[in-house]
Image (cartoon, rainbow, N blue to C red):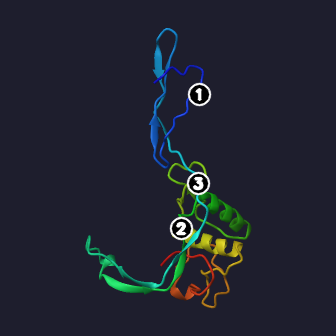
Amino acid sequence: MADISGRSYTVRRLKNKTPYYFVVTAVNAAGESSESDRLMATPLAKAPKPELVRIPAGPFRMGDHLDQTECALPVHTVDLDEFYIDRHETLYALWKEVYGWALAKGYQFDNKGQNGSAAKGNNLPVVMVSWFDAVKWLNARSEKEGRTPVYYLDDAHTIVYRTGRVDLTNSLVKWNADDYRLPT
């Protein structure tokens, strides 16, 4: 590499979401050198905009014979109604926005989540949340956007699930709500 004494150096043509490892070597006028610890950086493009995509109604084959696990058997055909799903995973930035709103509205979570495995920035998918946190967060996102939540604590669907760890049976789910929910 060329001598870049006293100047910054920009590494170009890096691929998005690909980790790169760097070691910096400094050499003084007498020729003595020292190396930095190995550093890792992962460049990220701009965060994708939230977008729902339509999944058309129709049949699909559910299950597999790959590892003979009981939960994947028997392979069978399932007919689905049309639905919409987020094109991308929930980014930490959106998680934090809804999470902060939810806390102010009385929601309680087991974990505040973090931004990807490195926990840096805001533009990686949220991780370190429980299933219970995810469904409460989806209720909060629905309420924040003026939609009807889907997860409740009572069969009449009058008490919105906002706290605790509740085994949500089928009767506690308002399946026809205009909400956000986990795919099932």
Residue at the right extreme of this rendering: 104
Return the residue nearer the eye: 33 or 103: 33
Residue 34 is left or right of residue 155, and the answer is: left
Return the residue nearer the eye: 117 or 1: 1
Tell me the quarter of the picture where residue 77 sits. Answer: bottom left
Secondary structure under the numbered disc 2 in the rendered image: loop
Q: Which of disc 2 and disc 3 is earlier in sequence?
A: 2
Read off the residue under disc 3.
123
Return the residue nearer the eye: 37 or 63: 63
Residue 135: x %, y % from top left: 57, 73
Q: Which of disc 3 and disc 1 is earlier in sequence?
A: 1
Residue type for callout 3: Asn
Disc tally is 3
Between marks 2 and 1, how big is the CA–CA gap?
38 Å
- Residue 60 to residue 156: above or below: above
Residue type for callout 1: Ser
Secondary structure under the numbered disc 1 in the rendered image: loop
- Tell me which residue sits at (69%, 68%) in the image: 102
Mark 2 nearby-residue class (10 Å; few <14, some 14–19, many ≥20): few
Q: Which of disc 1 and disc 2 is earlier in sequence?
A: 1
Asked if disc 3 and disc 2 are in contact, CB closer than 8 Å, the reply is no
Residue 73's mark? none
Between marks 3 and 2, how big is the CA–CA gap?
15 Å
Residue 8's mark? 1
Residue 87's mark? 2
- Tell me which residue sits at (63%, 78%) in the image: 161
Residue 3: x %, y % from top left: 51, 20
Residue type for callout 2: Arg
